[in-house]
Image: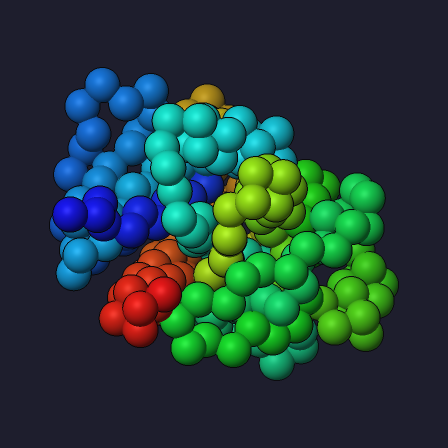
Amino acid sequence: MNPPARIGLLAPMDHELEPLVRMLALEPVEGAPDKRHAAIVNGVEFVATTTGIGMAAATGAVERMLDDLAVDHVVVVGIAGGVAADAQIGDVVVPAIVVDGPTGREHRPTPIGDVEPFGRLVTSDDLLVDPDGFAQFEADGVIALDMETSAVAVVCERRGIPWSVFRSLSDHPRDGLVDEAILELTQPDGSANVEALERYLASDPGAADRLAKLARDMEVATNAAAAAAIGACKRWSAGGR
C-alpha cells in the first residue's frame, strides 16, 4: 500500500498554527526538533509547524521540514497586512504571484484545490508604513504584504516541491494600528516580548485598546486562513491531486 500524500503546513507564529491544530485535530510529534504537529485526515497526512517571523527563519523552517520528510506539497498559512483600499479584515489572499521584496524576483504558487489565485503578495523583512509606498504597491496590483512566503518559495522551487500560500488580512494601514513599536512586542519565534509589552502599555494609555483590537482582528484572520487552506487541501486530495 502506498503511503498517504503528505502536506506540509507552515505557519509563522503560534497563534497562526493553533487553528490548524484545532481544525485538523493534529497531535504533537514526539521527538520533533520544532513545534511539529501531525495527523492523517481523509487519507492525507498533514504535518504543521511554525517558522518564526521573517525570511531567514522561514528559510530554516522549510529546509528542516523538507530534510526530515518527503512532502508532496507545502502550504504557507497565516496572516498578512492589507494593501488595497477596499480590503477588509479576514479577507483571504491566495496570490497568483509572490514577489521577493529585496530582489524583486517573482514566484508563482502552485494552485491547490479549486481556488483561483489572484493578485500579488510582497514578502520583506521591512515594515512598510509610508502611505506613498502603499499607494504604489496598490497601483502595481499588490494586495497584501508578509514576511515569510517568498523565502519558502525559494527553497521549495530549488527542491522541486509544489507550494501554495493562504494568507488572511489581519491589519490595514488605514487603521494605523501596526508600527515598529508593535513589531517589537513579538520575539523572532512569535512569542511575546513581555518586557517590551509592559513598557508599551505603561507609555501609552490607549495602547491596551489598540492591542485588544489587533488581537480580535488577528483571531478572525488566523481562523479564515486556516479554514481556506484546509478546505483547498481536502478538495485537492478528493480530486486525485
Residue at 61 percent of width and 81 percent of height: 86
Task: Please state if 186 lies on the left or on the right of 4 as rendered.
Answer: right
Residue at 56 percent of width and 73 percent of height: 117
Report x, y in % for residue 219: 35, 57
Q: Nearer the viewer, residue 9 or 110?
A: 110
When the figure is inspected, residue 15 is found, relative to residue 136, above or below; the finding is above
Residue at 54 percent of width and 56 percent of height: 80
Report x, y in % for residue 228: 36, 68
Report x, y in % for residue 200: 52, 34
Q: Nearer the viewer, residue 93 or 61?
A: 61
Is residue 159 something one can see in this rendering? yes
Q: Residue furthest bottom?
A: 86
Task: Please state if 230 lies on the left or on the right of 159 as rendered.
Answer: left
Is residue 143 something one can see in this rendering? no
Report x, y in % for residue 154: 64, 42
Quadrant containing the C terminus in the rendered view: bottom left
* Badge count: 0
